[in-house]
Image (cartoon, rainbow, N blue to C red):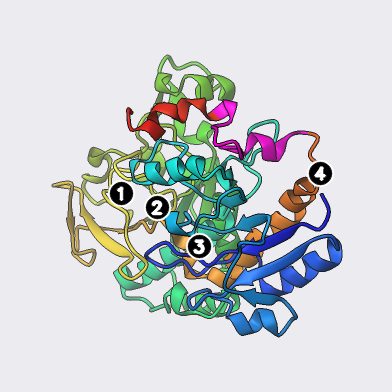
Amino acid sequence: MKGLRIGIIREGKIPSDFRAPLTPMQCVAVGKLFPSLKIVVQSSAVRAFKDIEYTALGIDVVEDLEDCDVVFGIKEVPIEALIPNKTFFFFSHTIKKQPYNRLLLKSILEKKIQLIDYEVIRDLNNNRLIGFGRYAGIVGCYNAFLTYGLKSGRYVLKPAHACFDRIEVENELKKVNLPADFRIVLTGFGRVGHGAAEIIRLLPIQQKTPTEFLEGQFSQPIYTQLQSVDYYANKLEQSFDKKHFYKHPENYISIFPKFLALCDMYIPCHFWDSRSPKIIVQADLNVPNRRVKVIADISCDTAGPIASTIRASKISDPIYGYDPATGLEVNFMNEEAVAVMAIDNLPCELPRDASEGFGEELIKIVLPKLLGDDSDRILERGSETNKNGELMPEFYYLKEYVSGMS
């Protein structure tokens, strides 16, 4: 594919998203790596990278993307901004039949647009190849320490969204002051979990194995990072079988309460299947002398595996309280309340850094395949629709959803 023209669309979803698929420097790098590509950027008043940052590096900032072959965005593109007969990349939030985006997918089909959804760009083992998970973990973990500082009164951190970039966030962490016996549990080893661990490792907190965490005595802050084998057990008391668990999660029970009883902060970063048992139920938190004070639910499955995550919170108001006795929301500073941080769009708090991390994956993984080196059909399998106005075979299940019948 020669002479390909790529447009970076302005984000139009409300509330505004400040991220970009490619930073100004990355646009320059793409031009050098792929001379056949031409990148233009649609003017935006809200993007974290200002128009002048692109034009200063020789990147054209335009108002109209009509002459582009491919359009890259982040969030859902407003229906009125869709351009017929183009290829669009963005997070469409349609693959789970989200009712609020049914008309968006319907319009994409009517306009004969090829939609390649980042969420379904996966390798042959069904592993996601591109996303913002790492920065969800980074920002969410930072917010966990921010929350504990407020709840305990030991220190005050600047909100991540008020920091210019990650460097300022890391400088803020120098204010963190934890008790000598402070304990953290982190669940999940994916991109989100690894991102959270990056922040923990910037602090004087020692990592311990799950067994050491349960059995040891320590005089300095510690954390442990758990896999599903550590906090789920087979109902029949058989040995944990990972493949069996993924296939039949309903046959397992949570043994997480033994970790919960010993931690001051819990940071969920796991993937949770709705067939799986709850990890924490209300009764697990409604116990005498409960130790855990903060649950920073980065996974943010509302009404899901963590009883205290009763709703998502907002960047502007990130913390609420959970009363284990009633199961209701209260002021997080109430003595008996668990302080809950459950923001569902965490990477938006550090849009410049999150954009850079996302752009790196776009350049490494997506662009070479877009130019024809896609023997594993990564982009084809990531396409929900084609330019004939049809759903691709792997997404036929969305037919009734599009028609409004499901």
Dot 4 and dot 3 residues touching (CB under 8 Å): no
Q: CA distance from mark 3 to mark 2?
A: 14 Å
Q: Which of pointers 4 and 1 indicates the residue nearer the eye?
A: 4
Q: Does residue 140 appear anywhere in the picture?
A: no
The magenta region covers 376-394
Q: Which residue is mark 1?
A: 309
Pick the front one: 217 or 66? 66
Query: Where 317 sits versus 389, above or below?
Result: below
Q: CA distance from mark 4 to mark 3?
A: 31 Å
Q: CA distance from mark 4 to mark 1?
A: 44 Å
Q: CA distance from mark 1 to mark 2?
A: 7 Å
Dot 1 and dot 2 residues touching (CB under 8 Å): yes
Check residue 297 in the rendering and tell me which mark sits there, or answer none. Answer: 2
Q: Is residue 198 left or right of residue 215?
A: right
Query: Where 388 sits versus 316, above or below?
Result: above
Name the amino acid type tagged 3. Pro
Q: CA distance from mark 3 to mark 1?
A: 19 Å
Circle nearer the N terminus (3, 2): 2
Q: Position of residue 54 (x, y in %)?
A: 67, 79
Q: Position of residue 213 (x, y in %)?
A: 50, 47
Q: Which residue is mark 4?
A: 372
| Element at label 1 | loop
Q: Residues within 10 Å of mark 2 (few under 14, many from 20)?
A: many
Name the amino acid type tagged 1. Thr
Q: Residues within 10 Å of mark 1 (few under 14, many from 20)?
A: many
Circle nearer the N terminus (1, 2): 2
